[in-house]
Image (cartoon, helix red, strand yellow):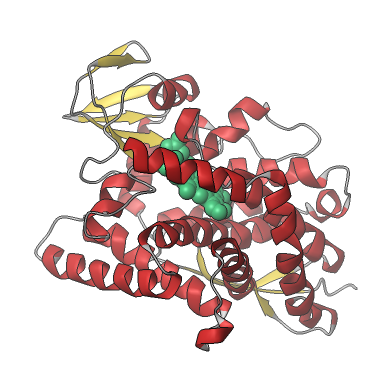
């Protein structure tokens, strides 16, 4: 196991050790039933589940269901069904089109230039904090939220989106604290809606911030630990490296879904109402194929970390552009990791802080 993989494993093993062990033990089966739950590990089976099997996208415990509950029944973006969803998705496609992304990009680059100046002077930089400001800045612009007018910073927006996501993920866990967790989640969602204007914007902020704040520090750590800075520095290999890093990080490693009709996955029967755990991490071969921009995995496999079919992630282009810019900004400093702390409460596996300095030999 490479040093990067060893470090990165901690984001799973220190936050959800039992779940990680179960998924590792069962990963050789393309699809495996445990009671009414089907674990889906295989690349083809994962794709089939997202493109061929009818899914109940508002069921309790799915991403869409959680959004709906937390927002008091108004989750229009992640419940992934109905006219509301189609309309919202069309509008979003414009905002996240290639020209839309190119309009947002300079804002993120300016944050990176300013925050990484500390590396040049030998100071430590917390990559998580940089990712908060980066994603908060880009998301505020995407949503057209004027934070300064309300005396707020991009970081405030990102933190609100992080808190809402973490509380939302906890809200559907069973146990005696469930009612309290649901109340906390509702409050956090209400705060975020108040900050960004409406429920749709809040859902988008959750998606845009949490994925980037999870992925960017893990990507920087991976480059630092496995000596990938030369590939990151070279404009010819940088985009492929970004895709490879997304593939091995699989920032949303599990997609919880529910089957809406009977069908099959990897030749095994699935019944309507079965809970499906779609393991993006295994479908994309994140667990057994290291990132390499020169010998990259096929695009069809790598892009599975953004889902598949009509509901696939509309933010993938923006996410890629941000990671490419992050790699370009960090690479000249050849950073090394000085200190890393896992975030055990976050909705997505990641670091609570990841401190780096420029390579000592510079
Ligand atoms: C590291 C980056 C990201 C990853 C790995 C990721 C992954 C995903 C995945 C797996 C899905 C579900 C797809 C499916 O069900 O087939 C999804 C949906 C979604 N993502 Fe992303 N995402 C990322 C970044 C973003 C960004 C930056 C935005 C917004 C700017 C965004 C907005 C959305 C939205 C709105 C949906 C719901 C789509 C729908 O309901 O049709 N994502 N994402």
Q: Residue 236, located in which quarter of the rendered image?
A: top right
Q: Quadrant of the C terminus?
A: bottom right
Q: Is residue 110 visible?
A: yes
Q: Position of residue 348 (x, y in %)?
A: 43, 56
Does 246 appear above or below 361?
A: above
- Return the residue nearer the eye: 144 or 251: 144
Q: Position of residue 353 (x, y in %)?
A: 55, 73
Q: Relative to 359, is 129 on the left or the right?
A: left
- Please count the marks in the image: 0
Q: Position of residue 250 (x, y in %)?
A: 53, 44
Residue found 22% across the figure and 59% down from its top:
72
Residue found 71% across the figure and 45% down from its top:
98
Does 41 appear above or below 238?
A: above
Going by the picture, which residue comes out furthest to the left?
176
Does 304 appear above or below 20?
A: above
Q: Relative to 22, is 201 on the left or the right?
A: right
Residue found 33% across the figure and 46% down from its top:
63
- Return the residue nearer the eye: 357 or 132: 132
Q: Relative to 186, is 96 on the left or the right?
A: right
Q: Position of residue 230 (x, y in %)?
A: 86, 52
């Amino acid at each position: 196991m490479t040093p990067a993989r060893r470090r990165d494993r901690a984001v799973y093993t220190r936050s959800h050790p039992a779940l990680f062990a179960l998924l590792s033990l069962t990963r050789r089966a393309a699809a495996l039933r445990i009671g009414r739950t089907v674990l889906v590990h295989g690349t083809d089976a994962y794709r089939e589940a997202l493109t061929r099997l009818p899914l109940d996208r508002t069921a309790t415990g799915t991403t869409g269901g959680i959004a709906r509950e937390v927002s008091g029944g108004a989750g229009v973006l992640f419940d992934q069904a109905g006219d509301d969803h189609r309309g919202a998705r069309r509008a979003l496609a414009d905002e996240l089109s290639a020209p839309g992304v190119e309009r947002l990009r300079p804002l993120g680059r300016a944050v990176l230039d300013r925050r990484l100046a500390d590396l040049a002077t030998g100071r430590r930089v917390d990559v998580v904090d940089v990712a908060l400001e980066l994603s908060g800045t880009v998301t505020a612009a995407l949503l057209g939220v004027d934070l300064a007018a309300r005396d707020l910073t991009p970081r405030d927006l990102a933190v609100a989106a992080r808190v809402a996501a973490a509380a939302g993920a906890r809200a559907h866990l069973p146990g005696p604290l469930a009612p309290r967790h649901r109340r906390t989640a509702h409050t956090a969602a209400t705060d975020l809606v108040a900050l960004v204007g409406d429920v749709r914007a809040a859902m988008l902020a959750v998606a845009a911030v949490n994925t980037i704040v999870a992925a960017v520090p893990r990507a920087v750590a991976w480059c630092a630990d496995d000596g990938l800075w030369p590939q990151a520095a070279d404009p010819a290999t940088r985009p492929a490296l970004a895709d490879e890093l997304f593939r091995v990080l699989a920032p949303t490693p599990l997609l919880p879904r529910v089957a809406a009709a009977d069908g099959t996955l990897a030749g095994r029967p699935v019944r309507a109402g079965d809970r499906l755990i779609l393991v993006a991490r295994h479908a994309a071969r994140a667990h057994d194929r290291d990132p390499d921009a020169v010998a990259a995995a096929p695009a069809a496999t790598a892009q599975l970390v953004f889902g598949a079919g009509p509901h696939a992630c509309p933010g993938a282009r923006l996410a890629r552009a941000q990671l490419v810019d992050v790699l370009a900004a960090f690479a000249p400093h050849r950073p090394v990791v000085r200190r890393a702390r896992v975030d055990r409460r976050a909705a997505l596996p990641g670091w609570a802080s990841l401190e780096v300095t420029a390579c000592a030999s510079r």
